[in-house]
Every structure is written in structure tokens, then in C-alpha cells.
Image: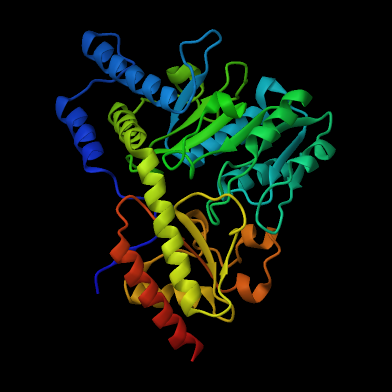
Amino acid sequence: MDPIYLDHNATTPTRPEVVEAVARCYSEGLANPASQHRPGQRARRVLEDAREAVAEILGADLSGSPADRLVFTSGGTEANSTAVLGIARAGGRSEPGQIIISSIEHASVIEPAEYLLERGWRLDTLGVTPEGVVRPGDLAGLLSPAARLVSVMLGNHETGVLQPVAQLAAICREAGVPIHTDAVQVVGKLPVVFRGLGVSAMTVAAHKFQGPLGIGALVLRHDVAVEPLLFGGHQQDGLRPGTEPVALAVGMRVALELWRKEHEAHARRLTALRERFERGLKAGFAGLVVHGAGADRLPHTASIGFPGLDGQILLLALDSVGVACSAGSACSSGSTELSPTLRAMGVPRDVLAGSLRFSLGATTTEEEIDEAVRRILQVADELRE
């Protein structure tokens, strides 16, 4: 059987134009952008052009007064860790404070927050509705004078449910508390305007929108202090020392520029494919549950509950017939713990245990969707029997 890849939230294939742009940088032999000679200065210009272009597409302004900042990282995980630990501990404050995150965050936000908890910090969690949406009204009651950071993702990596980050940012601004958002699953799928959201920091990762693996970014408002996690160099104002990957930055730029040209048609097409997929599964599996179906969602993500089935067994059975999907975040794929996101939504255990994530991408076709529905229903029927 031809393979059908429905795990684009984990990573999505790099666009050929991006591969060509990255390869061109390598073939040109660009120098270290920190070097002072002319080859280094040329590499610096290429890097900074890429940085400014990426920032502009993300709705940040690196040339304004005051100017935002965009720090290149190795990916979303490093950017999230830098935001959570770096902002919370900024300013040389040694005494523990308070951090607030939502109950549906990615592991790369949860685990740094728990690291602080283990060191005496107060960690509070914002709950969600049964549709998986954070309640903005709950935030004010959690904020204390010791609050150092709030972190709430823009779009959930499992359900695709979009979060009211702009409302949360307004509450944080009133309280004088920085707010970070993990926008990894939204950037490159829907338009995101950093300044419009009103957040202090935002995380993105290139490989989620057909850019190269190995590069992400943390976008920072001009007045946000960050304590670096790494040391040993002056690059990127010392916030993320180390030689910047010029070729990967160029690839990230190209991927975003291509997306911007096509984003409206791209979103419409993915939404239509996701709806076709969900309709087909509902028609063939009685009692099937689409998690977060009543909320605003990303166009490419479907979290599906198959009541009565074991999700891990279903995942392996689907893999054997060429359908690639996931049981949740790829960063948690080795865990036997049932989805924290779905548990936070109050999903009944029999549905929770039989839930899988299917995520579509730019390369997904209508024919693949129809064939995937056929294979999934056939496997599910066999397992139920």
C-alpha cells in the first residue's frame, strides 16, 4: 500500500524551494557571520536580511523605536525553554516566584515550569472548557504579586483548538506580568501578528511550516528581560550565543515567504480536507468523537476518539497498513501516559484511551484523505470484532 502521512504536526516535508535555498547557501560557502572580514560581513548581511524578513511576516518590528527582537534557536523546544526559564528568572532575581501555564501546554513548556516548581516556585495552572479553550476570566484570580510569567499556547498541538491569547495578554499587561505564547502549530497555517497579540514573547519552529529542521525563533518585545540559558559567546546580544546557522535562517525565510503568498488558499484547502476526513470517519464509526469540534480550530488538525478501542493498538495497526498518525505530541510519543490535553478537557476514559491525532499538510491530497478514511474504518472494524 502507498503510505499516507497524517502526522504533519510532528514535522512536515521541507519544500523543494527551501531545500534549494539552503543548498545554495552551503554551496556558496558562507563564512561565520560573527567574523569581521568581508566574507563574514557578507554572511552577516544575509543572516540579518533573513531575520528582518521573518520578523516582518510574523508581525514584529526589528527597526522600530522601540524595536522588537528575534532570536534564532535550534527549534521550538529551545525557544520555549528560553522563554519560560529565561523570562521567569530575568533580572538576577534569586528568590522563587510564581509562573502560570495552561493545562494543555506542550511538554517543552510544562517541563521547564515543573523544573521551577521543584526549586520552590509556585506553579498555577489555567484550566480549559470541555472544548479545550482556556478561560480568560480565570487568569486574574491566579495572578499574585509574585507572578513572573504566564505562558499559554496559541493553538493546541493535539486538538488544534485556538486559544484567546490576545485577551490573556491584555490581562497580563494590566497586571504588569510578561506573557509568552507557543505559536509553533499556528505560524505557517494561519496569519499571526506578534504586536497584534500583545504578548511579550512568542515561539516558532520552521519545520512545522515546510522550513528546515534545526531552526526556530523566539520573538521578544523590546522591554522583556531574558536570562540566557547558554553561555560562551556574544551572538544575538548574548541571549543565544553560538554561531548562527545562516543557511537554515534563509530556509526559514523562504518557507514563510512562500506560505504568505498562498496562505488563504492553503487554509481553505486544508479546512476542506479536514472536514472531509472527519465526515467520512463519522459516517463509518458510530459514536466517534472529534475533540474540540465546537471551538475555533487550526485547519489541519483533527483529534479523533474511537470509543472502545485502544489508541496505541490502533496506532500500530494503522501504521501496518501505511497510515502514519500519532497518539499526541511527538515529544511525548514514548510516554505511556494518556493525553494531558484530553484529560484536562474532561474526556471520558474510554474515549481518551482510544484517541489519536491526525494532522494534514500541504502535500496531503483528497485521494489520500478518502483512502485514509477507508483504511482507518477497516482497521477499526477489525479491532472491534
Residue 260 in the image: x percent, y percent? 36, 33
Residue 245's quadrant in the figure?
Answer: top left
* Left-right relation of 49 to 153: left
Instruction: Tell me how the rendering is colored.
Output: rainbow
Residue 83 in the image: x percent, y percent? 59, 32
Residue at x 32% of width, y 57% of height: 364
Residue lying furthest bottom = 385
Residue 320 in the image: x percent, y percent? 34, 76
Residue 136's quadrant in the figure?
Answer: top right
Residue 62 seen in render: yes
| Residue 236, above or below 385 | above
Residue 151 in the image: x percent, y percent? 65, 38
* Left-right relation of 232 to 124: left
Is 293 or 346 nearer to us in this picture? 293
Residue at x 83% of width, y 33% of height: 144
Is 9 or 57 nearer to us in this picture? 57
Residue at x 45% of width, y 85% of height: 381
Residue at x 56% of width, y 10% of height: 66
| Residue 179, above or below 223 | below
| Residue 3, above or below 234 | below
* Left-right relation of 318 to 346: left
Residue 7 seen in render: no
| Residue 134, above or below 4 | above
